[in-house]
């Protein structure tokens, strides 16, 4: 029974990481289907363009948001790569003819740690972004957050 819960937890964390990364760092639509992922510079440019289009940023806000994104996006990309590597290792551990429980638990512990770092980096960046916005802009910003668009419908 514990193995099932460990698997469910691992899959849940992996899916959440994918959603957050995709929504936070996805490049323009034209880059989503290409063989090479967008660069950090392309992601920053896309994110600023999206924020400008939705929130009518002031020049000062745009400058300050650019600085936040230029600092954060490379970290998000590196941490997302770490999550993918650990997920791959975990999948390999489950694919073995005989499951090495210790190896699976070790990979799950590592995945939880790298996932927590990624989630924390993204949450901190979103907080820093939101802190630069006016109350009116922030209301629009919150409506566009990934968990608002893809999460359970409010009743």
Image (tube, rainbow, N blue to C red):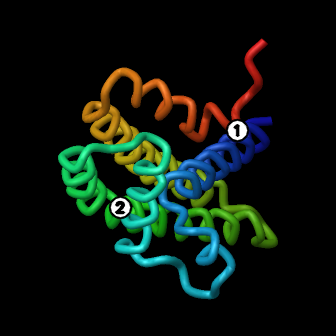
Query: Residue most toward the top?
Result: 155
Residue located 30% across and 57% down the image: 69
Q: 140 above or below 86?
A: above
Q: 15 above or below 154?
A: below
User: As rendered, which of 85 and 51 lies closer to the eye?
Assistant: 51
Residue located 43% across and 67% down the image: 43
Position of residue 136 in the picture relative to residue 150 (left or right): left
Query: What quarter of the picture does the N terminus occupy?
Result: top right
Q: What secondary structure is marked by label 2?
A: helix
Corner quadrant of residue 137: top left
Residue 60, horizontal then vertical, whole percent: 18, 46
Q: 28 above or below 19?
A: below
Other residues around mark 1 within 10 Å, as few (<14) / some (14–19) / many (≥20): few
Query: Residue most toward the bottom?
Result: 35
Position of residue 40 in the picture relative to residue 37 (left or right): left
Query: What quarter of the picture does the C terminus occupy?
Result: top right
Marks 1 and 2: CB-CB under 8 Å? no
Count the marks. Answer: 2
Residue located 48% across and 62% down the image: 80
Position of residue 44 in the picture relative to residue 109 (left or right): left
Mark nearer the N terminus (1 vs 2)? 2
User: As rendered, which of 103 and 66 lies closer to the eye?
Assistant: 66
Q: Which mark is on residue 150? A: 1
Residue 88, horizontal then vertical, whole percent: 62, 70
Corner quadrant of residue 91: bottom right
Q: Which mark is on residue 73? A: 2
Other residues around mark 2 within 10 Å, as few (<14) / some (14–19) / many (≥20): many
Residue 73, horizontal then vertical, whole percent: 35, 61
Q: What secondary structure is marked by label 1?
A: helix
Residue 104, horizontal then vertical, whole percent: 62, 56
The CA span between labels 1 and 2 is: 22 Å
């Amino acid at each position: 029974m514990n193995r099932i819960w460990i698997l469910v937890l691992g899959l849940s964390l992996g899916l959440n990481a994918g959603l957050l990364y995709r929504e936070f760092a996805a490049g323009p639509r034209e880059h989503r289907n290409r063989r090479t992922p967008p660069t950090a510079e392309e992601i920053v440019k896309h994110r600023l363009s999206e924020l400008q289009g939705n929130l009518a940023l002031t020049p000062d806000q745009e400058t300050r948001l650019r600085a936040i994104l230029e600092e954060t996006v490379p970290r998000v990309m590196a941490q997302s790569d770490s999550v993918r590597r650990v997920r791959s290792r975990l999948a390999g551990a489950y694919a073995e003819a005989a499951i090495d429980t210790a190896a699976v638990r070790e990979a799950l512990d590592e995945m939880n740690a790298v996932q927590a770092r990624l989630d924390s980096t993204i949450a901190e960046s979103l907080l820093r972004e939101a802190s630069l916005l006016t109350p009116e802009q922030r209301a629009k910003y919150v409506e566009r957050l990934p968990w608002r668009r893809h999460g359970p419908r409010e009743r």
